């Protein structure tokens, strides 16, 4: 450590001015840090040139490269935000085990091993612990405190650092972390397969690394512009390997072998292991995160439930995946939010959180939940999330004539709305030509879908007063089908009045009159309605309850607006197509895909409804 300090001081005396602000104020050192099993993980460390004081270590671990490599080649920015770069930290970036320049075998969402017997049993918790142990002992002028942060996959590694945490680890911020890859994050939503995301992601990320490398492995060369046409032409899921991947992507092969909630998926679910958490935790998520909204909400809830007394906080803003670190947060798609919400979060919450727990600086208010009302465009704080004070239950029932209201249809006669779902003509998830899953669809105008005959539309009367919904939403659908399996997609929509003002500023001339703004939507694979592990078929024509958990919202429907609920059975190619026959969808043949009539019941004890919680006036 003394020799490294002397070397840094020599660098300070000889260094020349540089336009790169990171190079101007930081030294860069690279290390292969040894793990307990003998493998070494590549780590870049940026150390402030001002060595007159000590600094905390702020680390992120990633499978996406810590480039640029080479001690004379610097990043152009450091840390989660410009605020923290200015505040002064020792910033640490690490390639996780088996990726790029780190030794060992890479395993996707590497399972936690709770009962380790020897030093050869490693996981992300041990790799994080061993890294912190080395850093604290070997990096000069650190103050003995460590913070960890990460977005998305790095958010998962941040969550893992909380388990069996090193004593020096004081503050962790899992941002858009993975929680469960079968029930709600990334690869599946309630058993339905995230086709576009998984296909595009693993075409590059899933390629095998033959040796230590600074470069991405060659991705499969699959070029297409129109995802809807491409995936429809591809046919059943099994043809992805036959036509494109050729069995050469290990995790795709694992996906195709685990259609249900097997031990493969259960082992990769981190939520039950978030116990005995000692560091302070700031969970961050976006209301419009198309990938890991489930992970953010459920990571926070799991920590709160299993760790009474831990300093745990959550921030939920009007952001797409990672938007709080990548955009100003003033808008998404056609929807404006009235301010630079990302800048507010970085300055007023994130930097203050780390400075408080790692530097003892005052200024962090410690508000349990800071959430953004996406209808009123304003931040609000609560003592918990979901809030428990000033909350009441409310249901909106699906009624005959495709209406919705808080009053239930009391008729004892069966009433229903029906549609034909055709796997050959699925409902698109967005009204544009794209090869990606994108971000804008989470707030997009749904008028393109509401005109289709295979989408049911239930609309309320115009509201006379504001209606603020806070927390989880659950759809209870009484359905029947002519097939033996079916997916059900439920959308909650804010319908703007014809008098709605245009967004300001409005460079694209977006007209908001009659806009059907998506607030929340979710899909559920019907055969998992009783169990994700043991699917069961539908009995044709039999009324069956399917409960669809939608993720939380915090949204105010303004006076004059209407609430709309849409129900459909395809959402393509965001999710794969259900054959509507009870088969293993990952091995299904083309002839297994069939048209089916689906009915949604609207009366008596078979009243379908959306259950939610509203803020009292």
Image (spheres, rainbow, N blue to C red):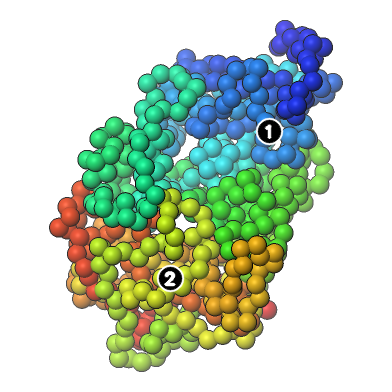
Q: Splitting the image into 4 quarters, where does residue 229 fall? A: bottom left
Residue 133 appears anywhere in the view: no
Task: Name the outermost residue toward the right.
Answer: 52
Residue 346 vs residue 128: left or right?
right
Q: Residue at x 60, y 33 (%)?
A: 60
Question: Tags 2 and 1 in contact by the CB under 8 Å rule?
Answer: no
Q: Does 143 sit above or below residue 473?
A: above
Look at the numbered disc 2 and give the secondary structure of its residue. helix
Pick whichever, 1 or 332, lies toward us: 332
Residue 160 vs residue 47: left or right?
left
Q: Residue at x 63, y 78 (%)?
A: 500
| Label 1 crowd (10 A; few <14 / some 14-19 / many >=20) | few
Pick whichever, 349 or 200, lies toward us: 200
**Which of the image's four quarters has the N terminus?**
top right
Pick whichever, 224 or 51, lies toward us: 224
Q: Does 162 sit above or below residue 382?
A: above
- Residue 359: percent from the left, percent from the top? 78, 35
Q: Residue at x 82, y 43 (%)?
A: 362
Look at the numbered disc 1 and give the secondary structure of its residue. loop
Pick whichever, 355 or 448, lies toward us: 448
Mark linked to residue 77: 1
Residue located beneath label 2 in the image: 448
Q: Nearer the viewer, mark 2 or mark 1?
A: 2
- Residue 514: percent from the left, percent from the top? 54, 78
| Label 2 crowd (10 A; few <14 / some 14-19 / many >=20) | some
Query: Mark 2 or 1 closer to N-term?
Result: 1
- Residue 275: percent from the left, percent from the top? 53, 42
Residue 138 vs residue 263: left or right?
right
What separation in Å lies between label 2 and label 1 (alpha carbons)? Answer: 41 Å
- Residue 469: percent from the left, percent from the top? 58, 71
């Amino acid at each position: 450590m003394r020799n490294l300090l002397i070397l840094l001081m020599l660098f300070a005396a000889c260094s020349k001015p540089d336009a790169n602000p990171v190079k101007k104020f930081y030294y860069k050192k690279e290390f292969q840090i040894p793990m307990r099993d003998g493998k070494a993980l590549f780590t870049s460390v940026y150390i402030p040139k001002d060595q007159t004081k000590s600094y905390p270590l702020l680390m992120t671990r990633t499978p996406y490269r810590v480039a640029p490599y080479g001690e004379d080649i610097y990043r152009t920015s450091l840390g989660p935000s410009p605020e923290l770069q200015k505040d002064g930290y020792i910033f640490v970036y690490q390639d996780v085990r088996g990726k790029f320049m780190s030794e060992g075998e890479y395993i996707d969402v590497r399972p936690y091993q709770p009962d380790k017997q020897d030093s050869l049993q490693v996981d992300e918790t041990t790799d994080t612990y061993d890294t912190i142990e080395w850093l604290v002992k070997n990096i000069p002028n650190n103050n003995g405190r460590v913070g960890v942060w990460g977005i998305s996959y790095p958010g998962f590694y941040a969550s893992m650092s909380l388990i069996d945490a090193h004593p020096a680890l004081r503050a962790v911020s899992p941002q858009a972390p993975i929680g469960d890859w079968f029930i709600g994050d990334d690869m599946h939503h309630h058993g339905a397969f995230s086709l576009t995301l998984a296909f595009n992601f693993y075409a590059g990320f899933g390629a095998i690394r033959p040796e230590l490398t600074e470069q991405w492995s060659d991705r499969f060369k699959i070029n297409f512009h129109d995802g809807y046409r491409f995936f429809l032409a591809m046919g059943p899921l099994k043809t992805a390997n036959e036509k494109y991947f050729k069995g050469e992507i290990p995790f795709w092969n694992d996906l195709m072998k685990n259609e249900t909630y097997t031990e493969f998926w259960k082992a990769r679910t981190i939520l039950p292991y978030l116990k005995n958490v000692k560091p302070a935790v700031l969970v961050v998520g976006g209301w419009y995160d198309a990938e890991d909204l489930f992970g953010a909400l459920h990571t926070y809830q799991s920590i709160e439930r299993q760790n009474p007394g831990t300093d745990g906080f959550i921030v939920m803003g009007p952001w797409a995946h990672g938007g709080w670190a990548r955009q100003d947060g003033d808008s998404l798609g056609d929807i404006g939010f009235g301010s630079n919400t990302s800048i507010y979060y970085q300055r007023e919450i994130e930097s203050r959180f780390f400075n408080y727990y790692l530097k003892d600086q005052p200024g962090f208010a410690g508000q349990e939940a800071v959430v953004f009302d996406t209808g009123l465009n304003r931040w609000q704080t609560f003592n918990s999330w979901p809030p428990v004070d000033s909350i009441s239950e409310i249901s909106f029932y699906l009624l005959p004539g495709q209406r919705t209201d808080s009053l239930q249809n009391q008729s004892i006669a069966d009433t229903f709305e029906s549609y034909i779902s055709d796997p050959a003509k699925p409902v698109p998830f967005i009204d544009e030509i794209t090869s990606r899953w994108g971000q804008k669809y989470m707030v997009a105008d749904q008028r393109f879908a509401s005109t289709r005959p295979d989408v049911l539309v239930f609309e309320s009367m115009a509201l006379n007063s504001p209606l603020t919904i806070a927390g989880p939403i659950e759809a209870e659908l009484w359905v029947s089908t002519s097939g033996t399996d079916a997916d059900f997609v439920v959308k909650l929509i804010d319908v703007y009045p014809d008098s709605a003002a245009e967004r300001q500023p409005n460079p694209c001339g977006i007209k908001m009159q009659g806009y059907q703004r998506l607030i929340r939507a979710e899909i559920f694979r019907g055969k998992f309605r009783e169990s994700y592990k043991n699917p069961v078929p539908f009995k044709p024509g039999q009324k069956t309850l399917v409960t669809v958990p939608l993720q939380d919202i915090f949204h105010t429907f303004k006076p004059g607006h209407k609430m709309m609920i849409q129900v459909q059975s395809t959402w393509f190619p965001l999710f794969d197509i259900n054959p509507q026959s009870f088969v293993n969808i990952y091995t299904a043949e083309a002839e297994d895909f069939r048209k089916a009539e689906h009915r949604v019941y609207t009366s008596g004890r078979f009243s379908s409804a959306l259950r939610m919680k509203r803020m009292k006036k």
